[in-house]
Image (cartoon, rainbow, N blue to C red):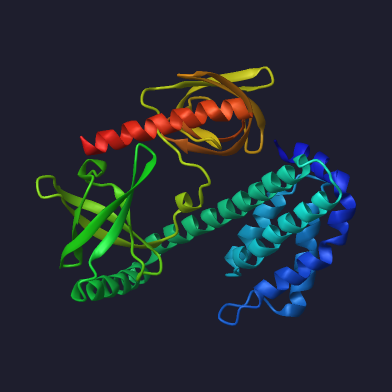
Amino acid sequence: MNFEQLASILKQDEEFFINYKDKFREEFIKNAKDKKNPLIGVKSLQPLVDKLYIILFSFKKNPLKELYNLTYELAHHEIDFKKPITKPLLKIIRDYIDSVSERNQDYKRVKALISLIDIYFETIENAYYKYVNELRNEIKSSSKSVIEGEKEVIFKLLKKLFEKWNRNIIILTFYKEMPVACRSEISEIVDNLLKVKTIHIKAFSIGDEVYIKHSNIPETVACKITNINVIEGIVELEVKGFIELPQDKRQHVRVEPEKPTKVEIRKGEWKVEGTIADISVGGIGAFIKDKGELKTSDNIIVSFELPKGKITAEGEVRYITSVENTFRIGIKLNLDIHQEEKVNDYIMDRQLTILKELKD
């Protein structure tokens, strides 16, 4: 469902949302008081939170653009917004469930609030993602000193692990869009390059970006594969820096179709055909040649064939990016239970096929 549909359901409980404002503000301010990284002065928080609450829960107009812009602006002022907003949004869901349960009302209302807050989280994440990408590009174009300093920290951590024989790490890669966590072991650290013995060697290609995870390293480390020894199962990695993976926050597993799968996208009388890049229960990524007047937040109809039948469902455009001579479009799908079953079965079959490829 899109914002308008969700808002029309939640407006039935307008009184709950009006009365919840003070509780939301209190929870937000409590979580914003981080001694190490305070949001802003407590006196300045109240008008910000009140404005935010009205944006999110007055249901008078679609708030996504305003929420995106607010998040983006706060990020530019180095204000940590994600941490204090998370708990209040989760708590309003909990309290709304209690309220709906006490009044013996339709669970459809709870589902609508969960879907709406999921959209809010994704909007906030997209705004931060844009800011971080701009920051990275700025650093790349202006100076390498920050990156080199970051690399130094990472290598100190890795060398400590190596010296203490705590050499087991996880290398995360994405093979045909499916996340593959490979048990690995650091075998050598030479000239700021990392040699790692790993399983599922087929999942790796020279030039790919992969990610190191270890319980003693606080963040995910991005690396680039510079060489592969297939016989010995060794990959050589160039460390790039710390990274926050958007994939870590995905609710659904994505897979790449086994063969080109056509998709038709319709908006009113206008339609275009494309090819599915990846698919999950939550949505699809697709490549199209012509985007026409299609834009973010548009409501569309999506159709494509799966082995167990055709899927035709409502969708919402989440992003459109230009890729060479085509456009990549991200679509959130609103599937019914039978459609979800078909997509789920397809994804499970693809996962098994992909895992078999890696083992053969």
Residue at the limit of the structure toward the right, as seen here? 15
Q: In the depicted view, which residue is nearer to us: 80 or 11?
A: 11
Name which residue lies at 36% across and 26% down.
258
Query: Can residue 292 be seen from the camera position used here?
Result: no
Name which residue lies at 62% across and 29% down.
337
Residue at the limit of the structure toward the bottom, as seen here? 35
Name which residue lies at 22% across and 49% down.
199
Name which residue lies at 16% across and 67% down.
191
Q: In which quarter of the image is the C terminus?
A: top left
| Residue 123: image location, x then y, percent | 62, 50
Q: In the depicted view, which residue is nearer to us: 137 or 210?
A: 210
Left or right placement of residue 37 versus residue 349 in this view:
right
Picture quadrant of residue 137: bottom left
Query: Can residue 38 be seen from the camera position used here?
Result: yes
Left or right placement of residue 217 versus residue 58 in this view:
left
| Residue 60: image location, x then y, percent | 84, 46
**Total numbered labels:** 0
Q: Is residue 248 above or below residue 342?
A: below
| Residue 262: image location, x then y, percent | 47, 20
Q: In this view, does 238 lie above or below 178?
A: below
Left or right placement of residue 18 versus residue 270 in this view:
right
Q: In the depicted view, which residue is nearer to us: 209 or 5?
A: 5
